[in-house]
Image (tube, rainbow, N blue to C red):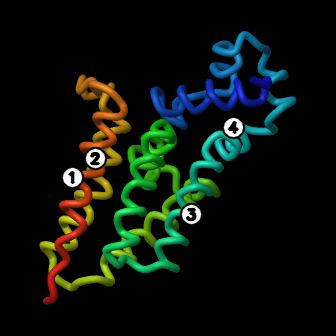
Amino acid sequence: MSSQQELQRIALAEFAIAGYTGTSIQRIAELAGLSKSSVLYHFTSKEALLEAAAGPAVGRLDELVSRLETNGINAEYRAAFIESFVDFIFDCRQEVHLFINQGPSLVGLAVIDRANDTVRRLVECFEALTSNPRDKMRFGIALGGSAYMLCTADNLAMPIESDEETRRALVEIMSELLAPVRAD
């Protein structure tokens, strides 16, 4: 793992635990066993480090949403989307944790603004299916609830038995919540 990747990993973990605003470049440097100037050599600012650490996850989510917008939410593509979304939240737990728990307070940071815009597009895809408030709530619970539960499981003392078992359960539950779209 390169120095930059290690710094990104450390920063992301610290941002998720202590919060972006509560984390300093000095703290990241200490955790990495480096000087502050060494961190700043690789990343010109804390925001640049956040962009490098969380930007790939935002890009991946944007790709998922773009494919959803292109393919629509028919039953055939919905299943593929759900599996891809669950894989995304498994792979990007810390980033998702950061977006969910800190996104509203970090408006104005480019990577957070992109994440928030992408999530709005995701919501619009499902909201377009119905005007029924019950269905809209079900969609929100399926998408947001699954992401929140998975990325905060450790903080909530809800240990995950196994990634595969949890993945299967999330896919099944999300499929149930997202599939029964009724005509208004």
Residue 42 vertical position relative to residue 103 in the rendered view, above or below = above
Which quadrant would the N terminus be assigned to in this image?
Answer: top right
Q: Amino acid at mark 3?
A: Asp
Amino acid type shown at disc 1:
Ile
Q: Secondary structure at mark 3?
A: helix
92 or 23, which is in the foreground?
92
Q: Nearer the viewer, mark 2 or mark 4?
A: 2
Residues tagged 2 and 1 counted as in contact (Cβ below 8 A) = yes
The residue carrying mark 2 is 170
Mark 1 and mark 4 residues within 8 Å of each other at the beta carbon? no
Nearer the N terminus, badge 2 or badge 3?
3
Q: Label 3 to label 4, Cα distance in Å?
A: 23 Å
Indicate the secondary structure of the residue bearing disc 2. Answer: helix
Q: Position of residue 154 (x, y in %)?
A: 33, 25
Above-or-below relation of 121 to 132: above
Of the image marks 2 and 4, the number of the one nearer the N terminus: 4
Residue in view at x 37 percent, y 59 percent: 82
Gap between marks 1 and 3 measured at Cα: 23 Å
Q: Which mark is residue 25?
A: none
Q: CA distance from mark 2 to mark 1?
A: 5 Å
> Dot 4 corresponds to which residue?
46
Residue at 45% x, 45% y: name it: 96
Amino acid of disc 2: Leu
The mark nearer the N terminus, 3 or 4, is 4
Q: Residue at x 54, y 37 (%)?
A: 20
Mark nearer the N terminus (1 vs 4): 4
Question: Looking at the picture, how far across and down is residue 69, in whole percent?
Answer: 49, 78
Residue located beneath label 3 in the image: 62
First of labels 1, 3 by sequence position: 3
Q: Please report contact status of discs 2 and 3: CB closer than 8 Å, yes or no.
A: no
Comparing 60 with 105, the one in front is 60
Q: Read off the residue under disc 1.
A: 173
